[in-house]
């Protein structure tokens, strides 16, 4: 199994020993086959770590189709042989490299969701999710349309909703960061 690995931000670690223990538990879960044995992309829940260490976990809906639901890259693993088949990452994307990879993996093997907290990330003022959020959905739609996606698909509706609420969404997320 492979995964994206981000080195932890020391300010984002609430308890380094606990965080390492969680990481090892996730590795054991992925390695033990708690998911579909043929899964090309086992993934779990993810959350946000706030400035003072408190964590909020966001339960994901089971992802049956990569193009319909968000799969957090920090809580996703993928089989090495599939990576060799569909890789590498498309570095023309700034935001949607992982989404593009999930779609290509989903075309080759089933996805498998485990309803357990596998990861967390920390938002900060320079995070792409804050500073460049407006680039996310257009790139995801580029992948969607590249693969023959319909203009009436749920992801297109989500794009328009997100576009309408984006200023308020960014304001809300910045408020959470600066608490």
Image (cartoon, rainbow, N blue to C red):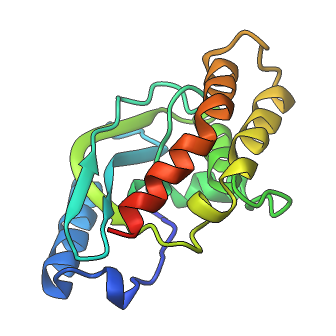
> Which image quarter: residue 81?
bottom right
Which residue in the rendered view is the most extreme toward the top?
152
Q: Is residue 141 left or right of residue 12?
A: right
Q: Is residue 42 left or right of residue 155?
A: left
The residue positioned 54% from the left and 35% from the top of the image is 109
Residue 111 vertical placement versus 84 (above, below): above
Residue 99 vertical placement versus 132 (above, below): above
Position in image of residue 24 (x %, y %): 21, 73
Residue 116 vs residue 46, the one in the foreground: 46
Task: Say whether residue 49 is visible.
Answer: yes
The residue positioned 35% from the left and 29% from the top of the image is 61
Position in image of residue 45 (x %, y %): 30, 47
Residue 109 vertical placement versus 4 (above, below): above
> Tag count in the figure?
0
The residue positioned 57% from the left and 69% from the top of the image is 127
Position in image of residue 129 (x %, y %): 57, 58
Q: Is residue 53 left or right of residue 76?
A: left
> Which image quarter: residue 58?
top left
The residue positioned 47% from the left and 43% from the top of the image is 71
């Amino acid at each position: 199994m492979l995964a994206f690995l981000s080195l932890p931000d020391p300010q984002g670690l609430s308890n380094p020993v606990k965080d390492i223990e969680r990481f090892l538990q996730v590795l054991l879960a992925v390695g033990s086959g708690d998911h579909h044995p043929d899964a090309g992309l086992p993934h779990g829940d993810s959350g946000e770590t706030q400035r003072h260490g408190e964590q909020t976990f966001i339960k994901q809906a089971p992802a049956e189709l990569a193009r319909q639901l968000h799969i957090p890259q920090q809580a996703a693993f993928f089989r090495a042989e599939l990576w060799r088949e569909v890789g590498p990452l498309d570095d023309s994307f700034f935001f949607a490299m992982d989404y593009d990879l999930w779609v290509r993996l989903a075309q080759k093997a089933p996805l498998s969701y485990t309803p357990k907290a596998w990861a967390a990330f920390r938002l900060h003022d320079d995070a792409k999710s804050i500073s460049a959020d407006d680039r996310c959905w257009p790139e995801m739609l580029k992948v969607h349309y590249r693969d023959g996606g319909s203009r009436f698909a749920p992801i297109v509706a989500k794009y328009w909703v997100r576009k309408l609420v984006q200023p308020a969404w960014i304001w809300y997320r910045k408020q959470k960061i600066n608490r």
